[in-house]
Image: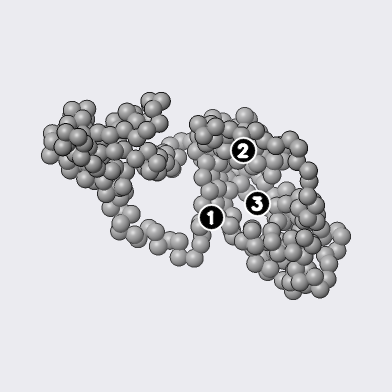
Amino acid sequence: MSISKNITKYRKQKGYTQEQLGNLLGVTNQSVSKWESAVSMPDVMMIPKIANALGITLEELYGIEKCCTNKSPKVTADHFPMEANKKLIEYFREQSGEDFHTNELEDPWSLICVSDISGAAHISNGLSFINTDYKAPQSERIFNNDEFALAMKNLSDRKVRTVLAYMYQASFCEKDTSCKSFSLYDISTACNLDIDEALDTMKKILDLKLLEPFVNDDNITEYLFRKSRAFYALTAFKIIEIMTQETICYEVVRDTSVINDYAFEKLW
């Protein structure tokens, strides 16, 4: 693949327009258009700047395939989340330069990188997430979604939180990977609720799509705690924890006048 096609490919992967890429490089969008259509070639001194702006290597820009003999070993599903987060931290360290070392940051720590064009990333030793819709047109409408507001209201209910804590502990703190089911009697007894309170609470958790009701062989309704969705609720609370606690947080401050634009500023 030619340089012209690679510029187009990686520019689109970054979500840049020709004008945005041109602004990063200090050239016009017409120049970028000519490069991509192969009408002209970038100056040789511009090549490293283009690769840096697109976040790729010179080999990738030139389309040179490297022979990878040392493939990363596969990890088990049990270790994948931890390894994936470790790779994200390593990638951030690689991009930001050798001066950045997480072991030098106060623990617990968080890094926030907010882009003007491609979203936001939160990276930490406990929870990392990427939101590519941040600052997208009309993304603020989510704050006015009544269905989401009802879900947050249900999550804030003390009884709902008590039951979720019980089901979470009973489901995730065991090695058994299958989903665990609970009866109203289980919930009532373990969470000190009467049957009506337990039923009302389970309905609220059902609205959050965290449970799947079924009738067992004894004709008793049980509720399957859906692990594949329960971690969303846990993550929501962990994000709120980040917002409200005195966690050491650093923001990535960009300076596009230099090649390496990663600098860190303590937020709180």
Hey, what amino acid is under mark 2?
Lys
Where in the figure is residue 126, as x and y percent of width and height?
Answer: 50, 34
Query: Helix, strand, or loop for circle 2?
Result: helix
Mark pair 3, 1: CA separation: 18 Å
Residue receiving disc 3: 254
Where in the figure is residue 223, as x and y percent of width and height?
Answer: 25, 39
Q: Quadrant of residue 54?
A: bottom right
Query: Which numbered tag is attached to residue 132?
Result: 1
Query: Can residue 179 be spotted in the picture?
Result: yes
In the image, 83 versus 151, the foreground residue is 83
Q: Residues within 10 Å of mark 3 (few under 14, many from 20)?
A: some
Residue visible at 85% across and 63% down in the picture: 43
**Does 102 sit left or right of 31 as displayed?**
left
| Label 2 or label 1, whichever comes before in sequence order | 2
In the image, 182 versus 165, the foreground residue is 182
Residue receiving disc 2: 87
Hey, what amino acid is under mark 1?
Thr
Q: Quadrant of residue 219?
A: top left
Query: Helix, strand, or loop for circle 3?
Result: loop
Residue visible at 30% across and 47% down in the picture: 208
Mark pair 2, 3: CA separation: 22 Å
Query: Can residue 31 be spotted in the picture?
Result: no
